[in-house]
Image (cartoon, rainbow, N blue to C red):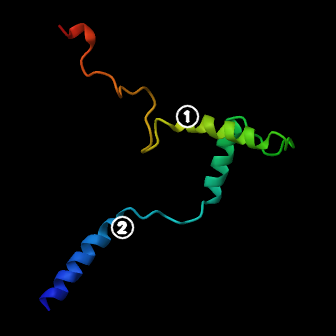
Amino acid sequence: MKSLIQTVVVAAAFAAPVAVFAQSNQPLTRAEVHAQLVQVEQAGYYPGDGDQNAYPAQIQAAEAKIAAQNGATDVGGVANGSSDMAKPAVSSSNQN
């Protein structure tokens, strides 16, 4: 009986993080789809303009604009700016 309790406790400990990081698989609402469409149109993409020759480039450019605008508010990813990787921790002017 004691090993059964230990097994349940260990299983619960491993299952808890999975529940925390689960994503919602719910479909977008009509309002969310409309808001995304308005945002893409404001970025310069007009889906009904009939120009099918520039389709991939136009939507990718609009999505890049939106990503740049939302970059500061997104969670995770790479921060905008520069990196000091492979640079000395102390500047050469401070060394003797």
- Residue found farthest to the left: 2
Image quarter (top left, top right, bottom left or bottom right) of the N terminus: bottom left
**Residue at 34% across, 27% down:** 86
Going by the numbered disc 2, the residue's amino acid type is Val
Quadrant assignment, res 22: bottom left
Above or below 11: residue 78: above
**Residue at 78% across, 45% down:** 47
| Position of residue 85 in the picture relative to residue 94 (left or right) | right
Going by the numbered disc 1, the residue's amino acid type is Gln
**Residue at 28% across, 21% down:** 88
- Residue found farthest to the bottom: 1
Which residue carries the number 2 mark?
18
**Residue at 46% across, 39% down:** 73
Which residue carries the number 1 mark?
69
| Position of residue 95 in the picture relative to residue 75 (left or right) | left
Q: Nearer the viewer, mark 1 or mark 2?
A: 2
Q: Rounded to the nearest whole Å, what is the CA distance between mark 1 and mark 2?
A: 31 Å
Badge 1: residue crowd in 10 Å (few <14, some 14–19, many ≥20): few
Is disc 2 placed on a helix, strand or loop? helix
Q: Position of residue 72 (x, y in %)?
A: 46, 35
